[in-house]
Image: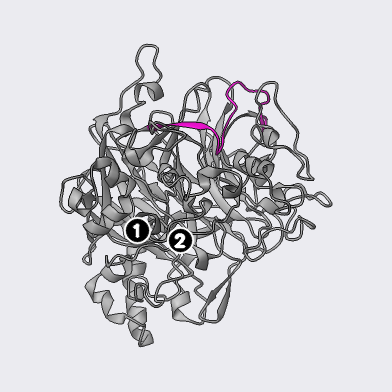
Amino acid sequence: MAKDFSAMEDSNTSSNPSIHEVSHPARRTLLGWGAGAAASALLAPLLAACASPSNSASSGPRISFKPIPIDTTDRLVVPEGYVASALAAWGEPIGVPGNMPSFKMDGSNSAADQSVQMGMHHDGLHFYALPGARSGLLVMNHEYTDDGLLHVGGMDNWSADKVRKAQAAHGISVIEVQQSGDSWSMVRPSRLARRFTASTPFAIGGPCRGHAMMRTADDPRGETILGTLNNCASGKTPWGTYLSGEENFAFYFSNTDDSNAHQKRWGLRKDSWTRWAEHDARFDISKTPNEPNRFGWVVEVDPMDPTSTPIKRTALGRAAHEGAWVAVTKDQRAVVYSGEDARNEYIYKFVSRDAIKPASGTLTQAQANRELLDHGTLYVAKFNADGSGQWLPLVHGQGPLTAANGFADQGEVLIKARQASDLLGATKMDRPEWLAIDPSNGWVYCTLTNNSSRGQPGQPAVDAANPRANNVMGQIIRWKDTGDFDGATMQWNHLVLAGDPAAQRLEAKGNIKGDLFACADGLAFDARGTLWVQTDMHASQMYKGELVNMGSNQMLACDTATGEMRRFLTGPVNCEITGVTWSPDGRTMFINIQHPGENASDRSDPKDPAKFSNWPDYAPGGRPRSSTVVIRKKDGGVIGT
């Protein structure tokens, strides 16, 4: 999510060590980066780790496409031999039978129209194949809205109608797509087309269902929540459902109580990024103090059943969830990894109590596992100085997680997962975002996008593990659990520190082998074992006065056996590259282009919507639109080869 990083949530004031303070002891002696030779010595073992075959597949896939240069034009660029086209842009009707309003470029679509159109700011997505023809469902998140583009007149004359339209532009879309020859298109109408918005009823599953902290005047039983919002990354379960993370929910609420320690720990503020509280009391904390507790969950959707009710899975813990990614143990239990996109917060994993069930009788596999994620144990990660780590259980009654310390029961532990992790001594991380699990060897990768507060007063100090104050470059960490995915311990190292090898300042160089990048965000392995990395950065990264030109945001392919990074795609002006999925044959890649043209300082200009970009329509006076993009090789081959 593009934003002013300096304004991001930073509410962890615990004394827990940060990831930077627990790196290998031999690397901790370089606090402040003294002599250049010492700094070079620090980078050498990190470079070695990148190519270590013991930490990656010993015979990783070769990346054979010709890399592209950085680009700053308002276009989407792919390598020679590839073609890319926009599909399913914001405002396109999703295909609900009998209700397919066309998109109006002037922004005059109503809230009712928007509720059956593609939402704004596409993010995580996955492909679900349909039987028979070359078709499937794309399920994707819509992270937030740019109200300057969404409404006629932008933020002027704010009203209840504008709030309803903004809420309708959030959430999740389910669309049907099909391939004909070399092209893909939306299927409209489709009985499976569906939208989940900030007003859709969601069931509450797991230990927090009915909990006192989940009850409101509108929902006195604490069993149903209206809406999902700020949905960021996504996961696809082995039983055929879609997991979506509710990320920066705190910024939607206004009028927090400054004396309430729980609200303060979750980054709630007096003023929000939106003006929803003016017309929807749910988002006014002074009127509905428990409403924020009902957001920040992992949401599960069954895309194949248009009659199903989506569920917030509280056993996975409450956080500013970037997303959720599923591994399977040898005895067929589900393990769900997640992180939260906030400075100095934590990485979690959930291990299900029960094994994944097969389809049975009239029940689909999704239906057979409807309660699988409601029972199990949540853990938080602690990274040790020697490259080992532990998964600490967040279980009521164990260790400090007692009533005496403010946790009346397991439901309260999960609602207050941050406070529980603080007490357990978990490791503070630099904005853990997407995760990816290497299918060949079980190593788990996580993007730590950046932490601009690093080294600032009252914040974790600079150190050898991440030796950059005002860390605007970010890094990718990886670990492998001991024995199996449910292991209580792990081994970890860094895949790469991002940056520009040509930078003048050593701290901005990083240790990239191949094409430069910064602020890794999206992350996924394809079926061949190639790791795809997407970025969310400003076009020019500033480090201590040095301007490092990174171009527009990009997607790269990484051979984890060698550490090579090769640039595959660059996006239009001011966009973010996010979300990636493939058709089953690997010959079509789907990605999302989010917020083209957005400017962090003044967002969009309602009087000149195309001031920064008018991708993908390039229509005179048009509006830039987030969109899914279809990428194929001209020769019909597998992507990346």
**Crowd band around label 1 with a 10 angstrom C-alpha radius: few (<14), some (14–19), many (20+):** few
Q: Which amino acid does label 2 sit on?
A: Glu
Q: Is residue 14 visible?
A: yes
Asked if 365 appears above or below 411 in the picture, the reply is above
Instruction: Indicate which label's residue lies in the foreground, 1 or 2.
Output: 1
Query: Up-down: is 41 above or below 389?
Result: below
Identified by mark 1, the residue type is: Ala
Quadrant where the N terminus lies?
A: bottom right
x, y (%) of residue 523? 46, 51
Residue identifier under label 2: 9
Q: Can residue 402 be seen in this view?
A: no
Which residues are the magenta region? 180-204
Question: For the residues marked 1 and 2, what is the alpha-carbon distance in whole angstroms?
Answer: 15 Å
The answer to whether the residue labelled 1 contacts the one labelled 2, judged by CB atoms less than 8 Å apart, is no
On the image, the x and y values in percent for residue 14 come to 29, 65
* Mark 1 lies on residue: 261
Which corner quadrant of the image does residue 395 belong to? top left
